[in-house]
Structures are given as C-alpha cells and as structure tokens.
Amino acid sequence: MTTAEHVDVLIIGAGLSGIGAAAHLAKDLPGTSYAVLERRAASGGTWDLFRYPGIRSDSDMHTLGYRFRPWRGATALADGASILAYVRDTARDYGVDQHIRYGHHVTAASWSPTTARWTVTSEVDGETRTTTADFLWACSGYYDYDEGYTPELAGQERFRGRVVHPQHWPEDLDHAGQRIVVIGSGATAVTLVPALAASGAAHVTMLQRSPTYVLSVPATDSLKRRLTSMVGEQRSYAVTRWKNIALQSALYRLSRRRPELVRKVVRKANVAQLPPGYAVDTHFRPTYDPWDQRMCLVPDGDLFRAIKDGTAEVVTDRILGFTETGLELASGRHLDADVVVTATGLNLQVFGGAELTVDGEVVEPRETMAYRAMMLSGVPNFAFTIGYTNASWTLKADLVAEYVVRLLRHLRATRSRSVVPVRDPSVEEVPLLDFESGYVQRMVHTLPRQGDRAPWALKQNYLYDALALRTAKLDDGVLRWS
C-alpha cells in the first residue's frame, strides 16, 4: 500500500457536483488544499458516461448551470455534449482540472478521532492507495454507474435482435432502418424516442406499463435572449435563473395543493399537440398526482411531433416476454423489433459504494439521520451532495457547497478539529427522498433517514432552503465542534 497525499478537503467524484464543489473551494477558500478522486478516466460524471442518442438535460440549463458561472446562450434543455463541455470548461477556468486524480475507485473511508483525519482507500490500476484528509465530501451522486436497472423479462435469450440499456449505449449500434422498442416512460425514454425517430430508425415504439406526465417547454428562452442583448450575459443569466426558479417552485406548490387543476392543464396541452382523437387518457394520464414522480419535459414538443408524423408511437401495455422477433404483450399484441432498449431506470448507490467507518465502527447509512440533507449524524467532518428531485440538481448542489465553505471557515476560525451533527432522539424519522419513482422506492431503505423537522428535514424548496442555509447559525446546538 502506498500513501499518495494529504489534503485539507477530499472530494469524491468529478461530475457536475464534484467540480462545482471544488470550484467553490478554489474561489471562496483560496489556499485550501484539495483533491478530487474520480473512478473513471474522464471528468463529467453522468454527462460523460451516458452516450445514448439525443441525451440532454431534463432541467433548464439556467438552473442546472452553476450559480457562479453563467450558462451562455438561450438554450433551455441542452444536449449532453454541450453540458459536458460546460462542466469541463468550469473545471479548467477554476483550476479544478489540475486537482483531479483519475482512475481512483474509492472503496473505503475511515475516520480517526485521534488524528481527526479521514483515511480514504482507493483501488488504482490494481493497487491499493490511500489519501488522508481533514474533511471528506462525497459528490458521487446516488446512481450506480456500473449497471442500470433492468427488470426480469421472460425469454430474452430467444430474441434474435439486440437488447441495450441506455446507461451503456454501444458505440457500434447502427439503428438506421431498424424497428426499435424503447421500454420505459421516464426522462430517458421520452428523450430517446424522438431522437431515434429523427435519425433514421424505421419505426420507434415507446412501450410503457403506465403513463408519465409529459410537458412541452420551449427549447430556447426568449427572455434570456432579449436580456442578453440589453444587459449582458451575467445579468441576463441571473434574471432568467430566478425567473425559472420561481416558475418551478410555483408549479410544484400548485401541483401539491391543486393536483386536479395541474392534471387538466397538462392534459389540455397534450391534446393540443397530438393527433385528433388520440387516446390521451390511455397514454398520457398517470394514476398518480403531478410531481409524485418527476415530470418529463420535452423541448418544443418533439415527442408529440414524432407521434403526430407517425415515426413513433406509444403503447401502454404489460410485457409477457420476448419472442424471437420482438415482444409479446398482455393484450395479445406483438411488437416486432430489431432493437429493444431497456430505458427502465437506474439503481441507487450510497456514496459510490464506499464503506464508511468512524473510530472502527462501520457506518450503516440507513441507521443515520441526515442533517440539512448534507451531513450524517455521528459522522464527523463529512458532507454529501444530493440534488433536488423536484427541481434542478445544481440548485441544491450550490447550496451545499456554500454551506460547506461556511463550515470550513468556522473550523479554521475556532481552531476546531472536527464538526459532527448530534442526533436528537425526539426527532421522528421519515424517508430522505419522499418520491414515488421506482428507482427511489427500490432502494430508499438503504438511504439515510431525515427528520420530521428542521434542521433534520429537507424542504424540497429552493427558496426556503437558500434562506435557511445562508442564515443558519453554525452554533445551533446540533453541530458539535471539538
């Protein structure tokens, strides 16, 4: 075992969250030594790994972009390559790229109260390497990047075509002239279907077990475009960002308070963009309320256009199993297919699968309580970044980064060696992610819990969280400094 280095702050993950976290350290805490450990050979996280046709953001870029670095241009739902370039440009502009250690698969992290340090173990080219740090920051998101979720489907071995998962899209897959069935109804599926239909597939079918809310939004932000010509990029970005935050927050609150009204509005918009007489209630009317699961946004109604021009269709049915030439459905219908894409979701994984120990005791995440949805009870000098489920991921990531910077400044100012949230036994436990999506429900029991009241509760409200976190007292009686 070789010891690589010691740093003040060690960040796990060089994706959107990790690079944003490191940029905050670089600009707000100059002189802080830090490193970013990245398992893969390239930065960008999701935006480098996912290569399926049409990949784009499912949140507008004026809120998915970092608060401190404007997303230039009026494009609202940007393509994956543009987002990847934005993330990497940010890393280069703030010197973060010089601090990334590639090929480091973090497997374990151990806190010693004696030294007040983390010892982080990584697998690097078949060897074990350790890095020590005063503060550990997990920015690896909550997805398992090794394997996506694929349900058991009978008879797959009989299928003579090709089965692929979007998480690992084959570079050699030529879909031109192919009959393609995309299984799924989430953000990946509604992105793939119009992209495949527009790029030469013979026909594309989106096969869903149940519908999802799908809402068309403008591909570009006209206000942003006009403002940029008047007041410049920085100011137009700030105004557009706050405008979109307010709209997202209003839609979410309205969805929770008056779900039937939002149902009607979404349905009316769908009817206006689909062919006359289309079975809207069969294919686009979910059984759950708006925002019980994430709402899918499609730029300029591209999914509806593909359905309208006949290059794509939606089938709502249950799969009995594969045949040699496609899929047999419960209704008796057979879908012929050359390629089946299982856009059936992702698997969750806590902290990239690394095992945490504190003073020799293994930390079971499900037995901890999340403080302000970014720290764990009983785990010193540790933070994690998980974004919003009802808004752009980066809105929460930026707030976490600002708060961690405050923690680090306070540690220095008070000459404290550690800070740890101490759990209040009177606070009741509730799930960390109150969300009905399958990928959450399958693994929610493995995640940390949150509390039923502040500062242990996540509001899923950026406006509330921004005020609460920026004004919160660090000596609040919950954080123990030593």
Image (cartoon, rainbow, N blue to C red):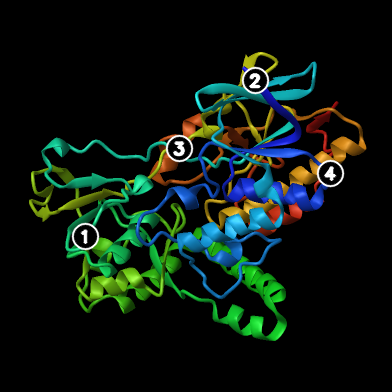
How far apart are the two marked residues, 2 and 3, measured between alpha carbons?
A: 28 Å
**Looking at the picture, does residue 88 appear above or below residue 413?**
below
How far apart are the two marked residues, 4 and 3, measured between alpha carbons?
A: 33 Å
How far apart are the two marked residues, 4 and 1, measured between alpha carbons?
A: 54 Å
Q: Earlier in the sequence, mark 2 or mark 4?
A: 2
**Looking at the picture, does residue 159 appear above or below residue 210?**
above
Instruction: Mark 2 and mark 3 in contact? Answer it, CB < 8 Å.
Output: no
Q: Earlier in the sequence, mark 4 or mark 3?
A: 4
The answer to whether one can see residue 14 in this image is yes
The answer to which image quadrant residue 87 occupies is: bottom right
Q: Tell me the amino acid under the disc marked 2.
A: Thr
Q: Crowding near pointer 3: few (<14 within 10 Å), some, many (20+)?
A: some
Q: Position of residue 96 (x, y in %)?
A: 68, 48
Q: Name the residue beneath numbered marker 4.
A: 31
Q: Name the residue beneath numbered marker 2.
A: 2
Q: Secondary structure at mark 2?
A: strand
Q: Name the residue beneath numbered marker 3.
A: 144
How far apart are the two marked residues, 2 and 4, measured between alpha carbons?
A: 26 Å
| Image mark for residue 205 | 1
Residue depicted at 18% across the width and 64% down the height: 203
Q: Tell me the amino acid under the disc marked 3.
A: Asp
